[in-house]
Amino acid sequence: MTTDTREPRVDEPSSAPTSLLRDRRRFGDSLFKGVATGSGTLILIILAAVATFLVGLSIPALTAPGDELPYGPFWSWVFPYAAGTVWAAALAMLFAVPVAIGVALFITHFAPRRLAQGLGYIIDLLAAVPSVVFGLWGINVLAPMVQPIYGWLNSTVGSWPVFSLIFGGQVSGTGRTILTVALVLAVMCLPIITAVTREVFLQTPRLHEEASLALGATRWEMIRQAVLPFGTPGLVSACMLGLGRALGETMAVAMVLSPGAGFHFQLLTSSNPNSIAANIALQFPEAFGLGRNQLIASGLVLFVITLIVNMAARAIVARRAEFSGAN
């Protein structure tokens, strides 16, 4: 029986570096998984903490008799603010969404590359402008500029049967109306919607666009047949991001709007429905006792409205994703 006494060759690769590299990769994967899981869990914890805070401090206002609350019965008091919040945000989206889609399509499919890059940078930079600056612009520039237009709308169509519900009433002499607030909010939402929509349109498969053009479609027909159906889920998500900012915007609304009591659909009067966020900002410094609880309870209503809007957006995206190929 012989024993192999050969010494190992010097040029044979050692398994130690391979094992060390494998251990490093496993550690990196474990670290990334832990950080991702912790971040997701932290978001849920923060959301639960905010909801618990709002519910806990809202219970005294929700359970107290109406005659004990400083601002009156809660639901009859909060309804005009909730309706004003939704009304202003809806008007802002009505103005912002078509413009954002047009700008995104221009940047992605019509503009020269150099112009598209510069315009995209300007749009992204607009999102960094503080809310106070938009409020100052709305007061000093936009409101005086649109006030003559409001007078013309009121005198032209304000007496018509249907349009009187929107453009009727006594026109504001300062232009600080709910319509002006909606225009300011539209400008504030425009960068967010445009940036997300632009990136979604750029993800449209090139083969889909070329196939549509090869079949004889015009540029607009190609966009309508290939780009818009593919980007619908992303467009809905972009609109919901903009709507979330419009619903929760505080300083710009508080600075521009001339608030009044109650809620109505007229856009040009000096007595305008206020939003929940702006009302909290204006009333909270002087509130005390049940007054603070009542204002916090209105914040809970705004929280629920935002949650419902986001859930509806997710449902729309989930229904459209299977048809567009997007996730």
Image (tube, rainbow, N blue to C red):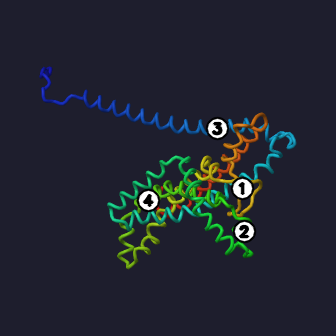
Q: Secondary structure at mark 1?
A: loop
* Disc 2 target residue: 168
Residue 234 or residue 248, whichever sits in front: 248
Instruction: Please state which amino acid type lies under the numbered disc 2.
Output: Gly
Q: Are marks 1 and 3 in contact (CB under 8 Å)?
A: no
- Nearer the observer: mark 4 or 1; the answer is 1
Mark 4 lies on residue: 198
Residue at image x 74%, y 75%?
161
Q: Nearer the viewer, mark 4 or mark 2?
A: 2
Give how far apart the Cα atoms at labels 4 and 2 are: 38 Å
Q: Position of residue 129 (x, y in %)?
A: 49, 48
Residue placed furthest toward the bottom: 216
Instruction: Tell me the CA gap for discs 1 and 3.
Output: 27 Å
Reading the image, the residue beneath label 1 is: 273
Query: Nearer the N terminus, badge 4 or badge 1?
Result: 4
Q: Nearer the viewer, residue 187 or 8?
A: 187
The one of 214 and 65 positioned closer to us in this rendering: 65
